[in-house]
Amino acid sequence: MSGLSGRAAGRPLTLRGVLLRNRVVAAPMERNYCDLAGRATQRYVDYLGARAAGGAALVFTESSYVSQVSKARPHQMGMHDDAVVPALRAVADAVHAGGALLGVELNHAGRVVPSTVSQQVPVAPSAVACREIGGELPHALSEAEVQDVVHDFAEAARRAVRGGADVISVHGAHGYLIGQFLSPRSNLRTDRYGQPTAFLTDVVRAVRGAVGEKVPVFLRLSAFEGLPGGLDVEASLALVDQIPLDAVDVLDLSAGTYGAGHWITPSGEVAEGYLADIAARYRRRSGLPVSVAGRVVSPDVAERLLDCGAVDLVASARALHADPAWARHVVEGTQPRPCIACNQGCADVIFTGRPLWCAANPGTGREGRARPVVVRDRPPTVAVVGGGPAGLQAAHVLASGGARVVLHERSAVLGGQHALASRLRAKPQFGRLLTWFTAELARLHVEVRLASEPDPGEVLHAVDGVVLALGAEDYLPQVPGVDHPRVVGIRRWLQERSAEVEHVAVWGADRAAVYVADDLASRGVEVTLIARADGLATDAGARERLHAVERLHASAAVRLHLGAVLTEVLPATLRLSTADGVSEVAAAGPVLVSQGAIPAEGWQPWSTSDGTPVERAVGPDLATFDAALRYGQSAAERLLLTLSGATTRATTPAISERALQAAP
């Protein structure tokens, strides 16, 4: 991929004689794909190989620990021991085969290392715990111990190069050990290392000495910490003057720290490319090429940042997580499957130890699994019934696999509950996925029939197979008064509401309840939220729910009744039971029920098929769109295998429902 389109993203860049084929970098991102010894698995090899084949110029691994005491997560990649080198070589071979360079990011997590992971007491510049995450009290490194850490970085750099790395990155951002030395919040030392950049200087010079003069070295920094008393934009920028820039080839700019992680992986409410102006200042001040991350997710924004000269490289992790060919789309100016900044399968999963997935792309993390493709004299005709996330994904998989697809959607628009969610304040990027699906179905010649409720008998007679993607409907617990006309499921209300209201009661505190309540409050509606739970949106991750939860707690228009059981719906009030007894709260307006979802009715008539295969896109978790996408993917793959008979180009089995549930 040579950038023949003339776009700025396609221009090559040479660093110390090393050629980057374009200006797109697959940024470091932990994935929980390594084994417990820090070695890359085949899943890791396949994942990074796909991003290289997808057009990125430079593909980074992830934040890789340089010693056992620096290990922050069980399945993190390690550069701490020679035993990791053969696995890294397999990664390098796959990345190089895809035409990209391999980068390895070296890191020591310092005081945020859990001793349960490292089996050692965490270390830090000073004995200051990271209170924002409930961190342990760390051991303050002596000067001799600091030098040992510097040595660890150098040895890790040597291992990375032996393993095939073309580029080394030193992680000085996000509140890890180097960032802890840089920050006045965590560095209280009075010796030489009390000077904020002294440790960073030693590390960078040691890494440069270890890798020689031919290997480019990146330095990742946070443009600001985002916490009171921490480094702001001006203080962070001033540190550039004290960094040994002669040993660095690229400044790689990000933002945030522990306790302000929403700046590391910002939500869709944050503007794309929000660090561009700051990055331009680093470029002018340092005289070095600058790479920038931070909500760089669309090709147009990436091209604008490069074309205006604000930065030299654009780095993205989540965008390539959603579409391994994102770099190619950036260079060619086409549209990738979009990252919608939900954090549901990536940022909020890292700390659980589970392998990451992508809410917007069921194929992420399964790059080594071949997809079934129909091999027949004529393309089979397949009906997909339902145009929500499951139906859209099923139609896309079926059409990509060689089937002629007719999609039926009973409403006048595609998207189902995902389309409803895209209207909410907290989900401004959700609509981008529907736009992409619409364009893709047109490209694949899928026939879309809106306002269509097909007759099962007629369809089964006319097609070779069917995927039923009927979606979900609200579950309404049978408490007294639930049949009152003003009580309605939250999904149904979003779909049918036609008039503005002054007051709404929301019964529930799951993610759907919280995001709807937040949206209503932002429109000036008084909201009463009642839930048995003690917290809000506990089914969502910390970064996903952060902004909406903060707003609900701060809003004067919202009354929260947590730890409360709704026992009866009365004409103008709701009866609640709490630890303090029984009470009634005023609630004369609509009562929106958000107590989970159950499969929608309507599949029974399709079960009388006279041999036409029918697959249901359904599973145990119907309340989230990413689960719906996975169910659609799995149902479509099962049907393709059935239609292919014994002849299929799939070299590995399709994803089973059990596998989908076990490893999203």
Image (cartoon, rainbow, N blue to C red):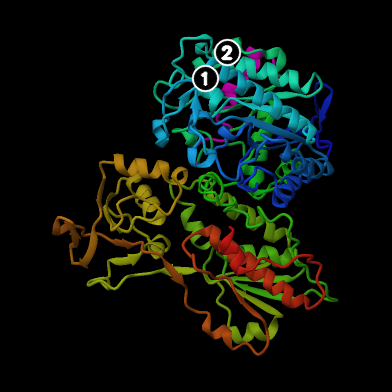
Q: Circle 2 sits in a helix, a strand or a loop, which is it?
A: helix
Question: Where residue 173 sits: x, y (%)?
Answer: 56, 27
Q: Quadrant of residue 591?
A: bottom left
- The image shows a total of numbered marks equal to 2
Residue position marked by numbered label 1 in the rendering? 181
Residue 498 can be seen in this image: yes
Question: Where residue 221 sits: x, y (%)?
Answer: 59, 24
Residue position marked by numbered label 2 in the rendering? 198
Depth check: 499 or 128 in front? Answer: 128
Q: Magenta residues?
A: 268-289
Tell me if residue 593 comes above or below residue 286 in the rendering: below
Question: Where residue 147 sits: x, y (%)?
Answer: 61, 18
Q: Which amino acid is tagged 1?
A: Phe
For residue 517, the mark is none
Check whether the beta carbons of the residues at disc 2 and disc 1 lie within 8 A of each other.
yes
Which quarter shows the C terminus? bottom right
Q: Residue at x 41, y 63 (%)?
A: 491
Depth check: 10 or 153 in front? Answer: 153
Is residue 662 in the magenta section? Answer: no
Q: Which amino acid is tagged 2?
A: Ala
